[in-house]
Amino acid sequence: MASAAVEYRSVSKIYGDFVAVHNLDLPIRHREFLVLLGPSGCGKSTILKLLAGIEDPTSGEIFVNGNLVNYLLPRDRNVAMVFQNYALYPHMTVAENIAYPLKARRWATRNRTNVGDKVLQAAKLVEISDQLGKRPEALSGGQRQRVALARALVRDPEVFAMDEPLSNLDAQLRDSMRQQLIALHRRVGKATIYVTHDQHEAMTMADRVVVLKDGIIQQVGTPFEVYNEPINTFVAGFVGHPKMNFVPGISLGGKSVRVGKLDLQSNCRTGPEGKPLMVGLRPTDAKFEASLNCIRGTVAASEFTGADTIVTLSTGLPEDLRFRLIDASSCHPGQAAAFSYAAEHVHIFDQNGNRT
Amino acid sequence: MTAYLFLAPALVFFGTFLIWPGLSLFVQTFHNGGVMSPAVFVGTENWERTFVDPLVLKTIWNTLRYCLMAIPAVFVIAMLFALALNSIPVGQTAFKTIIYYPTLQPILIAALMFTFVLHQDFGVLNIVMRAITGEPVNFLGDEDLAMPTIAMVEVWKGMGFWALLFLAGIQNLPRDLYHAAELDGAGPVRRFFQLTLPLLKPTFFFSVTFATIVNLQVFDSIFVLTDGGPFHSTASTTWYIYRSLFTFSEPGYGATLSFVLVLVVLVLTAIQSYAFRDKS
Amino acid sequence: MWRLARRKRNAVSLKPTLPMVTVSYGVLMFAAIISIVPFLYILSTSVKDTNSLFSYPPEWIPDVLYWGNYAKLLQETSFLNWTLNTFMIGLAVTVLKLVIDAMAAYSLAKLQFAGKKTVSAVLLLAVAIPVAALVIPLFFLVRSMGLLNTYWALILPALANPLGIFLLRSFIVSLPDDLIHSARLDGAGELKIFAQIILPLIRSGLVVHAIFTFMLQYTNFLWPLVAIQSESRQVLTVGISSLKSNFVVDWGLISAASLLATIPITLLFIALQRFFLAQSLSSALKG
């Protein structure tokens, strides 16, 4: 068995003068659920299309199971794709849709097996076997999604490519489909590349997350690593909700930094004294208490969201800071307040936005 | 590669029966003969003749005159029908079907029918005319009436087509705008002139351009109804082209006339595109 | 609450008022009458003999129905030949053009190739070229191919009209790209994608195109007049008009011919009414 299910080697994709993917090096392990995360236009869908053969790379090589696939037709790459809008064939029934990959490949003649059995097996796996006679238009969004999955499963591909498959579902359905997708992935055990712009999906589903911006990988890591040790301000800002606060600071040497008139302790080295820095503070890491390592200011606003409250604090810095409190009953607008941070939660970035 | 293979059959026919004739048309304007004997190069003789031939100017004027009568008339009538169709609660399909029916028939059959309807002695329209004015009208034999009569036949045949096209345009307009306009106190007449007409601009652009290209080639109805007469008062450019080839055996001259027709169509289409260009 | 009620009443009142509906029905009755009466008139004429034809005041329904015009039409003219020719040529053109145009439309709508913009621009420009102006060079071209006075003379040039490509292209463009990508991944080749995915999904476009093409052939006059000389190979339009060129015009015969000629197309219209009235052609061309 080759070392990686999929490997991109120095892959670039350029449209005219727009660089969609820049020099991508990325191995995807067997059985891995890899999530490509980034804002729209970051090249994440293009990376999938390059793998599937819908687009050709401008340069670089793509391997599936150790075989170079650059020059193979899409159908010969052993990659199945689930599209954002499902791309079900509207004029075929559910059964015909699921059977189409087998039919188009003359699978039955080659394998002397019943296509119907294969279709039923795939349909059962995604719990859609009671809808086989219907047309896609008669199905709900969630059911269409399942048909698209079954159509991908029926081929027994080496790799699954999924392009924002849950983005057209409503919030509740998305939650349950997310769990079912993960369960399915465990059962099937094939490498899956999953594209999304939803950091919540990425954090909950991924074995590893790849954060992308402008066609360039920012960070590859487990959800835990990406969240707790973001490599730069982009990743730090993109992952986590509410968004991380960034405030300018000046190094005091060692692991200390000065923000406005306050000094904060970090776990990271802050570099030589006097060096300008960017300090990142997650709203969710704040404690509503005045202690050593704290930010002080006046409460400008407080928004009750149900489970928690988002407090906006004016501190005399150019931008207001936001903090999340579970219990904000004693925190009212106009009042002075202080929020403290443990040293491990004080993220330090240099002037270019990179973690020190 | 596949893309070219899919395109190839269309391009073969397109090149052979449209582009090639188009190019040879230009070459033919410098030749004469060719029907019975081989074609002879005659230089710019045909072109020189075109500029001094009074009938050329007359046929162009006739064709334009015809367009200026037929197109506005058919558009106004069709719009009226479309508005009426749009405001009735029941029977829309039935009326649509009946009004569309004349459009199905070749203009030639319409023309034959009208030769008869308009006949000076026993045509039904002249029976009506005689009852009203006491005198029959010589619709097709009168120099001033012949072209308007031809335009009338073409309007009769075309009104159903344009009515349905305009109706489709009206029914595709956003309903919300009309509700908003009504809340602002705009009556049906103002809504028509201030909303419907401006919003239908894309439909009109297509319609005017298409109608102009088709009507500048008017031939069938003229051939059947008047054959260009009386005194060439209904001689259209296409009629002259046809006659140069078959009656006068002068294909070179006919080609030159054809070229003039192409130029007239292209110039008018360009002017229309300019007039309808998006001012925003 | 009051405002809401008022709004609702206003919204409902956008329905045409009673006077407007009355006027509309009046206009449409008028439209229906002028559309139908000429047909009834030739129907009446076609069942009259020469004497009652010129009677004054004219009778709409003659006392004795005279079928001689129809008999003469079917026995003494090539009317049946003309009808057969018209439908054979129309059918041939429609089928061939459907395939050719659908292929070209698919290529222009969904495939990438160098020169695509140029091809589209040339096709669009060609829409503005008056076909009547090409009659003379076409005559010589067809003659040099030895096809003058054959069915091919009517079939082949008709395949060059680019309008149909634009019509079908607009139908194909509206199909999502991912459908094609998906089929490609599922293992279908380009021909399979075209036949199994694209064609079934643009069925209504194909029907509209077929109707449009057939009608254009059926109503064609100038080109058959130029290209076909033999009477038995002629099409309906030119054939019927030739009935008029006799020295004494036989109105009963012409009326019978015109009326019979309308029957097949009327049947077609009734069968495919939905598509005739759809007018997707115009919306497609505007796009």
Image: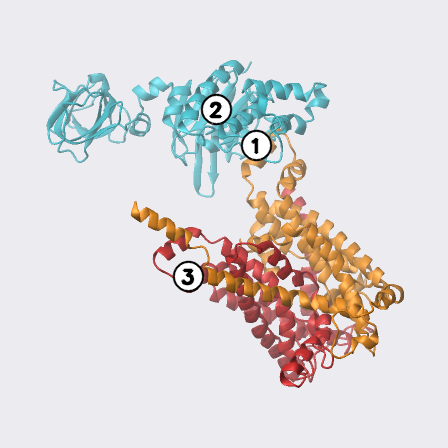
Chain colours: A cyan, B red, C orange
User: SS for tag 3?
Assistant: helix
Instruction: Identify residue for label 3.
Output: B191
- Residue type, mark 2 in image: Ile
Task: From this view, report whether residue A98 is shown above or below residue C244.
Answer: above
Dot 1 surroundings within 10 Å: few (below 14), some, or many (20 or more)? many
Alpha carbon distance from label 3 to label 1: 41 Å
Task: Please name which of the two marks, 2 or 1, marks the residue nearer to the observer.
Answer: 1
Spot occupied by residue C81 in the image (x, y as percentages of width and height): 84, 60
Please give the name of the residue rendered at 45% of the width and 26% of the height, measured from the top-left corner.
Answer: A25
- Residue type, mark 3 in image: Arg
Do callouts 2 and 3 point to residues on the same chain?
A: no
Residue farthest toward the right in the current orientation of the protein: C75
State whether residue B233 appears in this view: no
Marker disc for residue A193: 2
Instruction: Look at the image and tell me in which quarter the C terminus of chain A lies.
Output: top left
Marker disc for residue A136: 1
Front residue (pair B191, A141): B191
